[in-house]
Image (cartoon, helix red, strand yellow):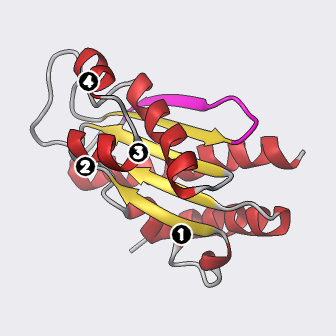
Amino acid sequence: MFAKELLEATDKLLLLCHKSGLRLATAESCTGGLIAGCMTEIPGASNVLERGFIAYSNESKTALLGVSQALLETEGAVSKEVASAMAEGAIEAADVDLSIAVTGVAGPGGDTKEKPVGLVHMAAAARGALTLYERYYFKGGRAEVRMQAVHAAIALLAKQAKTLTT
């Protein structure tokens, strides 16, 4: 299901976290659990992965991750602010060291002029560090957008993990 290069990058990330004693969580909207699924393809992932939140609806973003309703109303679910709030909320909700959050428009519908299909916001939070944020405009259909988001999320999470281990 996952490309060899993605599994290798994920294995490196999990090994780094394991050696450093870091636990992590995922907070996923448009990827619907694919990031956590990719991690669990790696034997021993349970040494690092505490849990994954699938927060697809606005209500679940609030209930599971503490994202404020006001923020969702003012910025929209697909935004830098909500991605960051999801990542930071996952740190608290799961009591972990690191988290990755992804929210976006995978398509084929649900887009607007301001938020086209392929727009993905992601944030990696860590205790004692600034939250890292990236925005992408991925090309392709729904499956391609979601899988590109998984690749980017693993890379961003690895970048954040390195800030805690250096």
Dot 2 amino acid type = Tyr
Nearest to the observer: residue 90 or residue 77: 90
**Where is the N terminus found, in terms of image quarters?**
bottom left
Q: What residue is shown at x 43% (from left), y 23% (from top)?
A: 81
- For the residues labelled 4 and 3, the Cα–Cα distance comes to 15 Å
| Above or below for 41 versus 88 | below
Q: What residue is shown at x 22% (from left), y 26% (from top)?
A: 116
Which of pointers 2 and 1 lies earlier in the amino acid sequence? 1
Dot 3 amino acid type = Leu
SS for dot 4 = loop
Residue 139 point in image, percent of width and height? 31, 38
**Marker disc for residue 83:** none
Dot 4 amino acid type = Gly
Identify the residue position indicated by label 2 in the image: 56
Circle 1 residues within 10 Å: few <14, some 14–19, many ≥20: many
Identify the residue position indicated by label 3 in the image: 65
Q: Quadrant of residue 164?
A: top right
Q: Disc 3 vs disc 1: which is toward the camera? A: 3
- For the residues labelled 3 and 1, the Cα–Cα distance comes to 20 Å
- Check residue 131 for magenta coloring: yes
Nearest to the observer: residue 149 or residue 70: 70
Residue 145 point in image, percent of width and height? 31, 46
SS for dot 2 = loop
SS for dot 3 = helix
Residue 22 point in image, percent of width and height? 74, 60
- For the residues labelled 2 and 1, the Cα–Cα distance comes to 19 Å
Q: Disc 4 vs disc 1: which is toward the camera? A: 4
Nearest to the observer: residue 155 or residue 162: 162
